Image: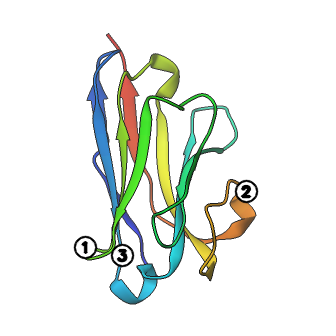
Amino acid sequence: VQLQASGGGLVQPGDSLRLSCTTSKLAFTLYAMGWFRQAPGKEREFVAAIGWSGAKTIYADSVKGRFTISRDNAKNTVYLQMNSLKPEDAAVYYCARSARRLQPPQSQPVAYHYWGQGTLVTVSS
């Protein structure tokens, strides 16, 4: 299973960015998806997750109200819309797929079995 993340870039504080993560239909349907991030010198941290149906989402407190996770099952793609970006949001962002099917959104990395290669988000003025 390969997850392809894209959409990272250099933005200024307050700007918006949308990340995408796509995989094959077989690898996407019925699985929960998540976004994590890792800043230099820090551990990987949970950002947002969406259940297999898209009906349920969860967020880290640090991004609530600013980030939105969504999925398009017809395109086998999960998105992370990031608004009002802050310098502390700068990190490599990773998408991940849950290990088991039909799961609700999960915040623990251990719940995810496959990871994308990461896409770099830089927030700087």
Circle 2 packing at 10 Å, graded few (<14), some (14-19), many (20+), is few
Question: As drawn, which residue projects farthest toward the top?
Answer: 125
Label 2 is placed on what type of residue? Answer: Gln
Identify which residue, 88 or 53, lies in the foreground.
Answer: 53
Considering only vertical position in the picture, is 60 above or below 119? above
- Identified at 49% across, 53% down, the residue is 94
Q: Residue 67 vs residue 48: left or right? A: left
Where is mark 1, residue-wise?
75
Q: Nearer the viewer, mark 3 or mark 1?
A: 1
Which colour scheme appears in the figure? rainbow
Helix, strand or loop at mark 3: loop
According to the picture, the residue beneath numbered tag 2 turns out to be 108
Image side of residue 123 versus residue 87, left or right: left
Name which residue lies at 37% across and 21% down: 84
- Give the image location of residue 65, x and y in percent: 48, 29
Secondary structure beneath dot 2 equals loop
- Image coordinates of residue 33 in percent, x first then y, are 51, 65
Where residue 23 is drawn, which disc sits there?
3
Amino acid, disc 3: Thr
Mark-to-mark CA distance, 1 and 2: 25 Å
